[in-house]
Image (tube, rainbow, N blue to C red):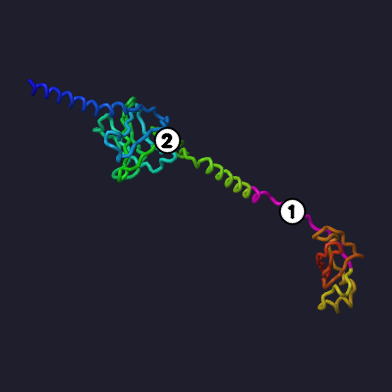
């Protein structure tokens, strides 16, 4: 009688243990919506006590097509290393795809579904060498149209800063291109006057020729100072050297050219 009672107690204990082991698996199953992100998912490290560690299991109903599962750690959880398994059954016996082999971080996996309304199961487990990474993450299942737009701009705290820097750099480049392509307004031709230069304004090698012909002493010189725009009247030109005059207002050198030589 006592033997039967002990066996009954053992059977009840084993059944209770089976239910205890089965309960976390079924209760942790979370349903995902295609092309929508599920945030604030917690994954403990494998160093935690055995009854505390549990991989994250999800199910999602998908139509035929190419799909991608993406894991994105939350800020402060960037060291989290995961592996993803896709299967057609909750026991993960009929595996469709895995994100990677061996230890390390494999946060992305893609696969193809051939029939509409197909339910797949997704297992996310901690995958570091020492089993010591943990953190909070977001998960999503995306078709090709949604995956590319989501993957190009992943959520990150640095994104606003990077966006501002990119806009500034782009604005500088556009400004440089526009300035380069904008045609420059041609500088107005300076107004020229023809005056007779004094002997000291004639270069030495032309002295003899100009002595024989006063007409050769005619030179061309601007009517205004190229630097300050002050007028240079023939009577006020201050000749300081061969074919060189000085502006009486700013002191700039104004060069002259022979009219006939």
Which part of the image, by quadrant, shows the N terminus? top left
Element at label 2: helix
- Closest to the camera, between mark 2 and mark 1, is 2
CA separation in Å, label 2 and label 1: 53 Å
Q: x and y percent of residue 163 in the render? A: 54, 42
Disc 1 crowd rating (10 Å Cα; few below 14, some 14-19, many 20+) is: few
Residue bearing the label numbered 2: 147
197 left or right of 107 in image: right
For the point 83% across and 61% down, the residue is 225
The residue closer to the viewer here, 8 or 55, is 8
Residue occupied by mark 1? 186
Q: Which residues are magenta?
A: 178-195
Residue 33: x percent and y percent?
39, 27
Residue 180 covered by magenta stretch: yes
Q: Secondary structure at mark 1?
A: loop
- Coordinates of residue 132 in the picture (x, y in percent): 33, 43
């Amino acid at each position: 009688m006592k033997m039967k009672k002990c066996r009954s107690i053992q059977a009840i204990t084993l059944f209770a243990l089976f239910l205890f082991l089965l309960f976390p698996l079924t209760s942790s199953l979370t349903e995902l919506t295609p092309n929508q992100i599920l945030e604030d998912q917690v994954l403990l490290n494998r160093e935690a006590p055995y009854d505390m560690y549990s991989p994250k299991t999800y199910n999602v109903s998908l139509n035929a097509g190419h799909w991608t599962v993406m894991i994105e750690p939350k800020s402060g959880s960037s060291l989290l290393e995961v592996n993803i398994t896709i299967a057609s059954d909750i026991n993960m016996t009929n595996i469709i795809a895995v994100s990677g082999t061996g230890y390390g971080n494999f946060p992305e996996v893609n696969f193809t579904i051939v029939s509409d309304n197909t339910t797949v199961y997704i297992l996310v487990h901690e995958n570091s060498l020492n089993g010591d990474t943990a953190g909070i993450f977001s998960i999503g299942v995306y078709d090709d149209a949604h995956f590319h737009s989501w993957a190009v701009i992943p959520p990150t705290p640095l994104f606003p800063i990077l966006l501002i820097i990119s806009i500034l750099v782009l604005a500088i480049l556009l400004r440089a291109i526009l300035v380069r392509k904008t045609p420059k307004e041609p500088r107005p031709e300076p107004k020229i006057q023809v005056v007779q230069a004094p002997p000291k304004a004639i270069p030495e090698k032309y002295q003899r020729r100009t002595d024989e012909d006063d007409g050769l002493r005619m030179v061309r010189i601007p009517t205004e100072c190229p630097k300050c725009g002050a007028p240079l009247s023939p009577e006020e030109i201050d000749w300081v050297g061969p074919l060189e005059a000085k502006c009486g207002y700013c002191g700039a050198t104004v060069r002259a050219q022979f009219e006939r030589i």
